[in-house]
Image (cartoon, helix red, strand yellow):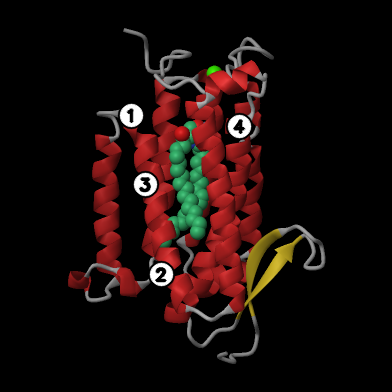
């Protein structure tokens, strides 16, 4: 039985050909494309500083899980090891769990929590610990389960989209869902249509997924922060800004808390 650390001990192997550019790195482009996680995580922490101070410092945990996801994903694609696959999937699970605990609007909690975020967080944390152990049983289904959680997030966001007339929030939701859908299409195409992509020698769809999903994160975070502010920060005015410049045609969104306490 191969060690869980052994190269190619995972059952999953993405479409990119292995060991084409180095004897140490199994999937070169799939490994280096995770660098966006290492840049975007700390950058969002610094850009959203004022928001995080006002809302909750636990958001730094979400950002740390995001960076860990990138690091473990690098390790996974470098080795295609079973341990790499598990660490990659478990870090995504904890990233989503921390996001749920912080930003899930209270009105969508199951009724028996009567709107208590601390009780809801306890349930999410216990469930996540349990699922972390269960993920060892059938690791190949984990990625599908994680994508199902994404569909639940999109469902909640859709309910909020129908409720709001805030143009800024509606725009953020549209871009986030568009980015997530494009990322998901790349992930699915790499997995299910690999023979076609190999025929035309285009092996980069999983790398494109890494870049698109890591850009979805700041858009998703800003969407959730705007959605949540309606319920949790009613006295505050949140402004969406873009890095590096508001005036540039493309940029990463972030939230700034406005000094005045006007409620729109
Ligand atoms: C109210 C809930 C709030 C939760 C907010 C969290 C937003 C999370 C956004 C992005 C998550 C990034 C996850 C990236 C994973 C990268 C590692 C990777 O590629 N792993 C693959 C193997 O290398 C593995 O096969 C991938 C498995 C599927 C991962 C599913 C990720 C779910 C992303 C959820 C995005 C929701 C977007 C909502 C937009 C409004
Ligand atoms: Ca491969
Ligand atoms: Zn990956």
Among numbered discs 1 and 3, the one appearing first in the sequence: 1
Q: Which residue in the rendered view is the most extreme toward the left?
A: 112
* Badge 4 element: helix
- List x then y, in percent, for residue 141: 33, 32
Q: Is residue 225 visible?
A: yes
* Horizontal and vertical percent position of residue 230: 47, 80
Task: Give the number of the disc on residue 139.
Answer: 1
The answer to whether the residues at label 2 and label 3 have Cβ atoms under 8 Å apart is no
Of 89 and 201, the residue lying toward us: 201
Secondary structure beneath dot 2 equals helix
Q: Quadrant of residue 6?
A: top left
Q: How many marks?
A: 4
- Identity of the residue drawn at 46% across and 14% down: 8
Crowding at label 3, few (<14), some or many (≥20) Cα neighbours within 10 Å?
Answer: few
Q: Quick one: which residue is furthest to the bottom in this view?
A: 262
Q: Judging from the image, what secondary structure is the residue with disc 3 in?
A: helix
User: Which residue matches tag 3?
Assistant: 148
Relative vertical location of residue 232 with respect to residue 98 in this rendering, above or below: below
| 202 is higher (above) or lower (below) than 252 | above
Which residue is labeled 2 in the image? Answer: 159
User: What is the distance, in whole Å, between disc 2 and disc 3 at their CAs?
Assistant: 17 Å
Helix, strand or loop at disc 1?
A: helix
**Residue 103 pos. (x, y %):** 42, 66
Density class for disc 1 (Cα within 10 Å; few <14, some 14-19, many ≥20) is some
Residue at 38% x, 71% y is 105
User: Which is more foreground, mark 4 or mark 1?
Assistant: 4
Q: CA separation, marks 4 and 2? A: 31 Å
Q: Reading the chain from its start, which is encountered first: label 4 or label 2?
A: 2
Q: Are marks 4 and 2 in contact (CB under 8 Å)?
A: no
- Closer-to-camera residue (197/25): 197
Q: Quick one: label 4 or label 1, which is nearer the N terminus?
A: 1
**Residue denoted by label 4:** 205
């Amino acid at each position: 039985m191969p060690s869980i650390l052994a190269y190619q001990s995972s059952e999953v192997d993405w479409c990119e050909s292995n060991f084409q550019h180095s004897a140490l790195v199994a999937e070169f482009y799939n490994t280096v494309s995770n660098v966006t996680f290492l840049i975007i995580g700390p950058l969002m922490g610094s850009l959203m500083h004022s928001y995080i101070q006002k809302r909750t410092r636990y958001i730094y945990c979400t950002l740390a899980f995001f960076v860990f996801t990138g690091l473990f994903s690098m390790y996974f694609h470098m080795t295609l090891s079973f341990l790499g696959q598990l660490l990659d999937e478990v870090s995504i699970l904890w990233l989503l769990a921390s996001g749920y605990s912080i930003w899930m609007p209270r009105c969508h909690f199951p009724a028996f929590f009567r709107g208590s975020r601390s009780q809801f967080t306890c349930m999410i944390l216990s469930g996540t610990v349990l699922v972390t152990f269960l993920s060892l049983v059938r690791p190949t289904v984990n990625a599908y389960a994680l994508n199902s959680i994404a569909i639940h997030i999109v469902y909640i966001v859709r309910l909020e989209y129908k409720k709001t007339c805030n143009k800024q929030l509606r725009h953020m939701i549209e871009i986030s869902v568009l980015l997530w859908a494009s990322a998901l299409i790349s992930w699915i195409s790499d997995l299910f249509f690999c023979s076609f992509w190999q025929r035309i020698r285009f092996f980069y769809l999983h790398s494109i997924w890494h870049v698109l999903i890591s850009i979805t994160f700041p858009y998703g975070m800003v969407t959730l922060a705007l959605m949540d502010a309606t319920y949790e920060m009613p006295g505050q005015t949140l402004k969406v800004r873009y890095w590096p410049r508001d005036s540039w045609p493309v940029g990463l969104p972030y939230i700034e808390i406005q000094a005045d306490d006007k409620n729109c």
